[in-house]
Amino acid sequence: FRASETEPDLFASNNMGNNKGVDSIAGIGRFSKLLNSLRSAKQDPEQWQYQPNFLMPPETNIAQRQLQQSLMQADQLLWKRRSRASLRRHQDIRNMAVRELFDTERTFVESLEYLVQKYMRPLKQPLEFYKTKHD
């Protein structure tokens, strides 16, 4: 690809030299503006002080705080109710588990008593009978 003779060569060294002076003047101008703004900031320190929630007007901040406090109080009440409900539910589950364990143990003991009456006593009787007969 060849550049035509009518179009200037943008990458030629002689074109770079021509813009160098303009760029340096613009750079100096930008630098001077920056220095001036910094100097004026030193004279007016209130401009750079931190202001919390500076995007919101003061009335909105007060209303926002009141809203947050009321929401926090509502959340606390709801949490207490939830806590009571969850404690009740926990106690109900615990009581149900204890009842289930008690019923299971009771049926186990009843089953053991049945086994003893049905099988163990008849098995012991012949031995007792045998012992008394042979003694």
Image (cartoon, rainbow, N blue to C red):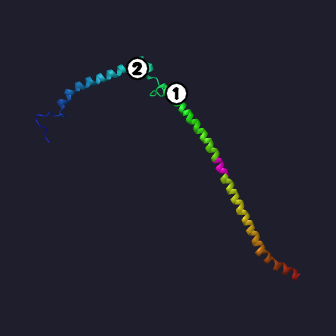
Q: Nearer the viewer, residue 39 or 59?
A: 59
Q: Residue 82, relative to residue 108: is it above or below?
A: above
Q: Nearer the viewer, mark 2 or mark 1?
A: 1
Is residue 90 magenta-colored? yes
Element under disc 2: helix
Residue 22 location (% of width, % of height): 23, 25
Q: Amino acid at mark 1?
A: Ile
> Label 1, on which residue?
62
> Label 2, on which residue?
41
- Main SS, magenta region, reads helix
Q: Nearer the viewer, residue 25 or 73?
A: 73
Which residue shows up at 18% across the image and 30% down it?
15
Label 1 packing within 10 angstroms: few (<14), some (14-19), many (20+): few
Q: Amino acid at mark 2?
A: Ala
Q: Which residues are magenta?
A: 86-91
Q: Nearer the viewer, residue 80 or 105?
A: 80
With 103 as the anchor, is 37 left or right in this view?
left
